[in-house]
């Protein structure tokens, strides 16, 4: 791709004021910009103490770094300034840069986009960089870093190379047959190509058969808190989040939207959803809340069905009967006599009534109960969290690091796999042309995965996740 004519600059560090601010400049005029601001260009990749000036005005004393292209992060000349992180300092430095002709402020993700366009990163690594920046837990960080270092990108490229090898064999045979001169040795070309295709199909199929560990780890496990109004769902969520995230109110139906709390449970990302009390309502706002609650809960990985343990029949008919596993959580244990000390409902300690109550829950498709808790006193909440943590570990812990971390990866790999399967299934007589076409489609899908072909339509979607200065 042609080098960009513009030189871009941006504040790459976090929101000021801060101890230090990092301003990056990338493009053909980066060296000139350093000259103008600091009157010198430091030795490549060595920090130099410089004064930054705007004409006669000394803006700050700072560290300057110089990374000449093409061996830089973007592949272009890069200058980096580490200034004091005050708002006025940053504003003055950005203002001085803006005065230099040929320089303009960077768009969100534009540094990374240039790195991609200059072949420094493939598309899976670009995505991984975005994931690394937003990773909230250690397991997410490790997965993003593996992906940044080419876990999927390198594999996909090696698959593509082997596919191109197979394609060359088929095309050689097509050429031969066009000359009406198929020789004994040529007849081995097609079986050779198809053997490669079959092996690739097996490997891609194995990569796809991963229980969606990678995507689930990236997105976080979703646990929806559902149940009738006033069961104490918001109180429970607040207790868990240890902050006032949901409105707690003694009046039914006040939590009208879906509230999310992000948790780090033993390194695994878990998103708790507090949903509007599920019940039919004439109030359109509340009805909308119920609709959203149902929709989110249907996609959740686990549902905590919270009921008021004091209310018989609280496990109402609205309880979901299909979809994710549902754990019954009997809340307000402080109001009910005869609980065991831990607040957990083991079968021995259940009174006759409660036994009946839990037996009537044939709908609990996981056969689990989340125990009994008191959102107000906190009894049983630690045990509940431990069980959710174990559930998360089971759902997110893969024996082997997975290659696929986004739906886009799964889509393109599935396309490649289907094309390979069609190539190897084509009837013998018409094989060459068909096989060649399918192998080409498969190679194209793999090329899309790493961003070698057909990138334009996905680029905007991917770079939307980036901030300015990245
Ligand atoms: P939601 O509609 O299910 O979200 O219920 P809320 O969290 O708004 O709680 C409804 C009412 O029950 C509030 O007055 C809470 O203080 C009360 N509550 C919630 N959990 C408990 C609990 O464990 N024990 C007692 N005694 N009251 C609770």
Image (cartoon, rainbow, N blue to C red):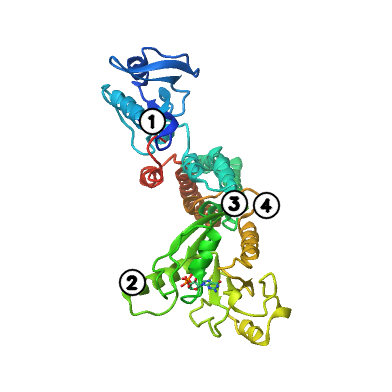
As drawn, is 13 to the left or to the right of 267?
Answer: left
Whole-angstrom CA distance, mark 3 to mark 4, is: 13 Å
- The label nearer to you, 3 versus 4, is 4
Say whether mark 1 is within 8 Å of ligand 1. no
Whole-angstrom CA distance, mark 4 to mark 2, is: 45 Å
Residue situated in front as seen by the camera: 122 or 25: 25
Picture quadrant where residue 339 is located: bottom right
- The label nearer to you, 4 versus 2, is 2
274 up-or-down from 399: above or below: below
Q: Earlier in the sequence, mark 2 or mark 1?
A: 1
At mark 1, the secondary structure is: loop
At mark 3, the secondary structure is: helix
Outermost right residue = 348
Q: Report the disc number at residue 86.
A: 1
Whole-angstrom CA distance, mark 1 to mark 3, is: 48 Å
Residue 223 visible, this angle: no
Whole-angstrom CA distance, mark 2 to mark 3, is: 44 Å
Residue situated in front as seen by the camera: 256 or 268: 256
Q: Give percent across and percent down for residue 396.
A: 61, 56
């Amino acid at each position: 791709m042609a080098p960009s004519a513009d030189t871009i600059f941006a504040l790459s560090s976090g929101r000021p004021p801060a101890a230090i601010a990092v301003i990056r400049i990338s493009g053909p005029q980066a060296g000139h910009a350093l000259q103008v601001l600091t009157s010198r260009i430091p030795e490549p990749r060595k920090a130099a103490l410089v004064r930054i000036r705007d004409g006669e005005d000394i803006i700050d004393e700072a560290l300057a770094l110089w990374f000449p292209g093409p061996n830089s992060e973007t592949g272009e000349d890069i200058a980096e300034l580490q200034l004091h992180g005050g708002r006025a300092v940053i504003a003055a430095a950005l203002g001085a840069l803006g005065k230099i002709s040929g320089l303009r402020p960077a768009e969100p993700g534009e540094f990374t986009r240039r790195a991609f366009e200059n072949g420094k990163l493939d598309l899976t690594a670009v995505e991984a960089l975005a994931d690394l920046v937003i990773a909230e837990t250690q397991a997410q960080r490790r997965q993003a870093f593996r992906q940044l270092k080419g876990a999927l990108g390198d594999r996909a490229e090696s698959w593509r190379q082997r596919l191109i090898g197979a394609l060359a064999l088929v095309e050689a045979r097509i050429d031969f047959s066009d000359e009406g001169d198929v020789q004994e040795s040529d007849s081995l070309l097609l079986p050779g190509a198809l053997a490669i295709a079959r092996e690739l199909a097996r490997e891609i199929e194995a990569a796809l058969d991963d229980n969606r560990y990678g995507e689930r780890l990236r997105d976080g496990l979703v646990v929806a808190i559902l149940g009738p109004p006033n069961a104490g769902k918001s109180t429970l969520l607040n207790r868990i989040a240890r902050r006032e995230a949901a409105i707690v109110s003694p009046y039914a139906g006040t939590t009208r939207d879906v509230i999310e709390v992000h948790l780090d449970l033993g390194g695994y990302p878990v998103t708790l959803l507090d949903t509007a009390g599920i019940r039919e309502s004439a109030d359109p706002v509340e009805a909308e809340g119920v609709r959203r609650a149902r929709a989110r809960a249907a996609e959740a990985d686990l549902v905590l069905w919270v009921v008021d343990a004091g209310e018989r029949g609280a496990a109402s008919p609205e309880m979901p009967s299909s979809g994710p596993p549902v754990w019954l959580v009997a809340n307000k244990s402080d109001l009910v006599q005869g609980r065991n000390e831990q607040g957990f409902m083991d079968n021995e300690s259940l009174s006759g009534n409660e036994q009946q109550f839990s037996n009537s829950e044939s709908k609990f498709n996981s056969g689990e109960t989340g125990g009994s808790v008191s959102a107000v006193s906190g009894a049983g909440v630690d045990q509940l969290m431990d069980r959710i943590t174990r559930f998360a570990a089971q759902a997110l812990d893969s024996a082997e690091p997975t290659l696929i971390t986004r739906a886009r990866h799964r889509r393109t790999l599935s396309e490649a796999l289907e094309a390979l399967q069609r190539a190897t299934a084509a009837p013998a007589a018409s094989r060459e042309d068909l096989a060649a076409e399918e192998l080409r489609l498969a190679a194209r899908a793999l090329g899309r995965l790493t961003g070698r072909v057909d990138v334009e339509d996905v680029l905007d979607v991917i770079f939307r996740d980036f901030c300015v200065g990245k």
